[in-house]
Image: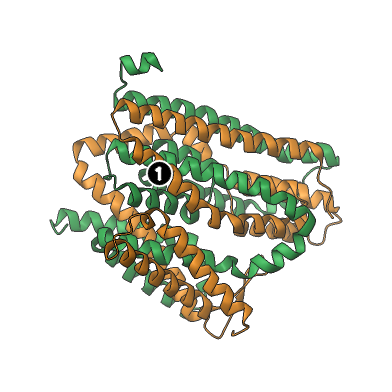
Amino acid sequence: MVESYAVIFVLGGLIALAIIGMSVFFIVKACRRAKQIGMDKKLIKDSVRSSAVFSIVPSIPIVVGIGILMQSLGIAIPWIRLTVIGALQYELIAMDQAKAALVGTEASYETFIATATVLMTLSILSGPVFNAIFYKKYQGKLASLQEKNGKLMNTVTGALLGGLLAGMLSSILVGGIFTVGNPTTDASGAVSYGEVTLITLAASLVIMGLCGVILKVFKQKWIESYALPITILGSLGIAYAFIAAGLF
Amino acid sequence: MKKSNATPQTRAEYNNSVHTIGRIFTWIALGLILLVPVAYCLSAKVLPDGTALLKSLPFLFGYLAIGLVEAFSYAPLLGTAGQYIGFITGNISNLKLPCAINAHTVTKVQPGTEEHEIVTTIAIAVSSIVTTLIIVIGLIPLLIFQEQIVTVLNPIAPYVIPAIFGGLTLVLLASYYKVAVIPFVACIVICVVGNLLGFGASLGQSTMVLVGMAISGISTVILYKKGKL
């Protein structure tokens, strides 16, 4: 196994603590503000509960991502890379880029890790640096637009959300259709079957629809907070059943 | 606490204080993140390969540009604190934003209101804590059962996004179908043409999200000016 140095673990611990500290600080600040403006406490409780439950399942692939990266980088560096901004696909591409750039040289494995880590780190800096220097000004402009024409700003914000949805869905749908009978293997080694992608998407729509029926027809209000986590778990269970049964 | 209760801040004052704290945390996080390669090089007594880094400059600039576009585009959706947390912890389109949308749906807060901003902040912060803790907890079984965990869970990893976005589409359809129709049709056409021409791999989810947001932003402003929204 690739060696992980104690100092990297210490840094990983500090980064995890900084993220938790920052998040707790903002939660406390938001709660105080909610109190100031007389916001219903139930909304806060519902936000915390629904967000905590929602985040569990989508976080598990991140742990798997560490398992994949640790084969090449040890455990400490992937832990840090996937705790902060970055995603498995990006990290794998950055790692491959470093590997490709070192082909034909006599670089040691440690030099490869150092090069890959520098590349991974530098490539994610623009977003946070933008926030630290320019975001306040940019947000001020957004706020003044909101003041001048609140309806337009709300419409544009809705449009960005609609665009995110449109982009994501089209990529999933078309990607799924074009890989039916023609599975692809991504950089992490995971095989993606178009049939399973489409079945998972359809299952997710149907399960969410059923949750809606349970909520509206059977008046089971509790399901509202858990509808999306139930949908994610249910459709992933169906995907797993198809893969485990070896149908594709 | 008592003082803030006696003299409630205006929304602008509250926002300014969030910026101040967000900037401080961002610089701290950036410092720690930048220390990682330095600490590795010092520990392993090696230097990164300069020539390899130079060869990787086009790749690096590409990623930096994507990061900037994301920072611009996600800002109206993440809220002030959410933007600072999201751009340190990542996984915005596949985790933080869906989590915030889920919280909005559960609490039924109206977009543009301060309640909406507060719920977004709480959702993204809670999500970041949960993910960070799950990762830390996951390290222990990973050290012992790395191969088994990857073997069992990696096959379903490609299906997490369809599992999230199928349900989310149904939730958001009623509110956003008017603004989402044009970008959806345009994105489908782009994806189909891209796949037929053989560069479908370049039109992954992260690329199409930005393309969809750009088309949606432009088409919505045009529709709005024509009075059709």
In the rendered structure, the answer to whether residue B61 lies left or right of residue B13 reads: right
Residue tagged 1: A47
Nearer to us in this view, A66 or A107: A66
Q: Is residue A229 visible?
A: yes
Quadrant location, the N terminus of chain B:
top left
In the rendered structure, the answer to whether residue A233 lies left or right of residue A99 reads: left
| Amino acid residing under circle 1 | Ser
Figure check: A52 above or below A213 = above
Name the spot of residue A168 as percent of width and height, x first: 43, 64
Name the spot of residue B86 as percent of width and height, x first: 49, 43
Name the spot of residue A221 as percent of width and height, x first: 33, 55
> Residue visible at 45% across and 45% down?
A49
- Dot 1, how many residues are within 10 Å of its Cα: few (below 14), some (14-19), or many (20+)? many
In the rendered structure, the answer to whether residue A221 lies left or right of residue A70 reads: left
Name the spot of residue A147 as percent of width and height, x first: 22, 35
Instruction: Tell me how the rendering is colored.
Output: by chain
> Residue visible at 87% across and 56% down?
A106
Q: Is residue A187 visible?
A: no
Quadrant location, the C terminus of chain B:
bottom left
Chain painted in orange in the figure = A
Figure check: B77 above or below B8 = below
Nearer to us in this view, A175 or B119: B119
> Residue visible at 54% across and 57% down?
A58
Total tally of numbered discs in the picture: 1
- Kindly state the secondary structure of the residue where label 1 is placed: helix
Figure check: B119 above or below A110 = above
Nearer to us in this view, B149 or A138: B149
Which shade of the palette goes to chain B? green
Name the chain under label 1: A
Q: Residue furthest left?
A: B227
